[in-house]
Image: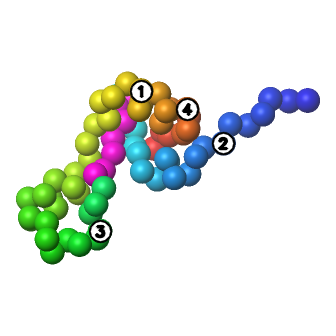
Amino acid sequence: MGKKNIKTHQATAKRFRKTGGGKILRTKGHHGHLRRRKSKQALQEMKKMHEVKASGLKKKIKRLAPNLDR
C-alpha cells in the first residue's frame, strides 16, 4: 500500500498565488457586485494583489494547497 496523494483544494488554488520568494498573494473581495457605489480608487485597490500577512492564515493556505507553486 503506497502513500496517499495530497489533493489541492481548488477554491484555495484559484484565490491565492505564490511568488518566487515564497510570499502568498491574494486579491480583495467585493469586486464584482454593486460596483457603481464604490469609488474608482477603491476599485483599483481591489484589483491589485496583496500579501497575506497573518501567519495563521498562511498555515491554512499551505495546508489546503501544498502544490500552490505557479
- Name the residue located 80 percent from the left edge and 29 percent from the top edge: 3
Q: CA distance from mark 2 to mark 1?
A: 21 Å
Q: Secondary structure at mark 3?
A: loop
Relative height, residue 46 to residue 21 (above, below): below
Asked if residue 26 lies left or right of residue 67, the reply is left
Mark 2 and mark 4 residues within 8 Å of each other at the beta carbon:
no
- The residue beneath circle 1 is 56
Relative height, residue 21 to residue 16 (above, below): above
- The residue beneath circle 2 is 7
Q: Secondary structure at mark 4?
A: helix
Can I make out residue 20 in this image? no
Q: CA distance from mark 1 to mark 4?
A: 11 Å
Count neighbours of disc 3 (C-alpha within 10 A) and say few if under 14, some if 14 to 19, many if 20 or more. Answer: few
Instruction: Kindly report which numbered mark, 2 or 3, lies closer to the viewer in this rendering.
Output: 3
Q: Is residue 25 magenta?
A: yes
Q: Secondary structure at mark 2?
A: loop
Q: CA distance from mark 3 to mark 1?
A: 27 Å
Q: CA distance from mark 3 to mark 4?
A: 28 Å
Spot the residue most to the right: 1
Asked if residue 30 lies left or right of residue 15, the reply is left
Which amino acid type is shown beneath numbered disc 2? Lys
Q: Position of residue 28 (x, y in %)?
A: 28, 52
Q: Residue 8 sits in which quadrant?
A: top right
